[in-house]
């Protein structure tokens, strides 16, 4: 029997809304690393079926925001200090590759102009914690996209959930200082200056400082 497209659309929309609601709750700190998320409670709270919640949580698990504990229960993911440092070393490698490809591109000046515009979002003092996280991640994702390397973007997106987990460890009080305009402006300056060595050093320092900050908080 053919599926009713309206039913399929409605089911898909509910799943997406549930997923976004859960993602926002996790990123905002409503649920902290290690917190257990129960299907029954969440389904009642969101007004959807347990199946819809299960599908939404499965997607968030694939993103790296949720993880399964030894008892098979889903919890908000957490990263230890060593994992945070490993994550940011990988990020440094990926984003140095992105910057290197931008510097070799004929579109370098245009890329720098686009990134300079993205700094405005990081300078917006009216953003709440969730908005600041999104502005920060959007800047770095844009950096990768401007390299015009789809594989690079795919790998970065695969790590995005764990990047969010690392940032969440800082919470609304300590994480924002790592997401300021001033911390990101040197990346754009280096691209504008077209100095490969300086650009690599800037990315390395940017990621090393973030790793030290978030690993220290977690530890």
Image: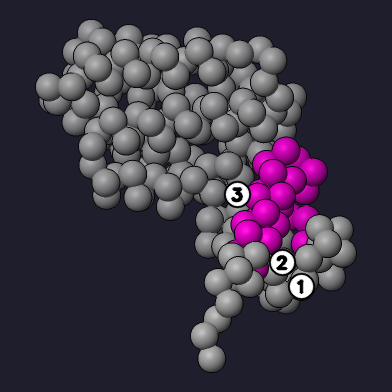
Q: Dot 2 corresponds to which residue?
A: 53
Q: Quadrant of residue 74?
A: bottom right
Q: Going by the image, does 173 lie left or right of 208?
A: right
Q: Going by the image, does 209 lie left or right of 141?
A: right
Task: Kindly check if marks 2 and 1 are in contact, taking CB atoms under 8 A apart as contact.
Answer: yes
- The secondary structure making up most of the magenta span is helix
Q: Dot 1 corresponds to which residue?
A: 50
Residue furthest to the bottom: 1
The residue under the point 81% across, 58% down is 46
Upstream in sequence: badge 1 or badge 3: 1
Which of 94 and 21 lies nearest the eye of the viewer? 21
Q: Dot 3 corresponds to which residue?
A: 79
Decide whether residue 12 is among the magenta residues. Answer: yes
Q: Residues within 10 Å of mark 1 (few under 14, many from 20)?
A: some
Q: Which residues are magenta?
A: 11-38
The residue under the point 47% across, 31% down is 138
Q: CA distance from mark 2 to mark 3?
A: 24 Å
């Amino acid at each position: 029997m053919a599926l009713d497209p309206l039913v399929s659309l409605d089911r898909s929309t509910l799943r997406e809304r549930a997923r976004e609601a859960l993602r926002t709750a996790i990123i905002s700190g409503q649920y902290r690393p290690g917190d257990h998320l129960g299907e029954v409670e969440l389904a009642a709270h969101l007004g959807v079926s347990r199946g819809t919640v299960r599908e939404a949580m499965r997607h968030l698990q694939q993103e790296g925001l949720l993880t399964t504990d030894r008892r098979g229960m889903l919890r908000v993911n957490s990263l230890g200090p060593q994992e945070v440092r490993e994550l940011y070393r990988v990020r440094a490698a990926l984003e140095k590759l992105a910057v290197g490809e931008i510097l070799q591109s004929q579109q370098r000046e245009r890329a720098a102009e686009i990134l300079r515009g993205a700094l405005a979002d990081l300078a917006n003092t009216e953003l709440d914690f969730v908005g600041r996280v999104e502005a920060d991640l959007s800047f770095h994702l844009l950096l990768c996209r401007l390299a015009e390397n789809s594989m690079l973007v795919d790998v970065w997106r695969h790590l995005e959930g764990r990047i969010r987990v690392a940032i969440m460890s800082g919470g609304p009080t300590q994480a924002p200082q790592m997401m300021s305009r001033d911390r990101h402006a040197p990346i754009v300056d280096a691209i504008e200056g077209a100095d490969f060595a300086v650009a690599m050093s800037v990315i390395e320092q940017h990621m090393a400082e973030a790793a030290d900050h978030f690993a220290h908080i977690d530890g």
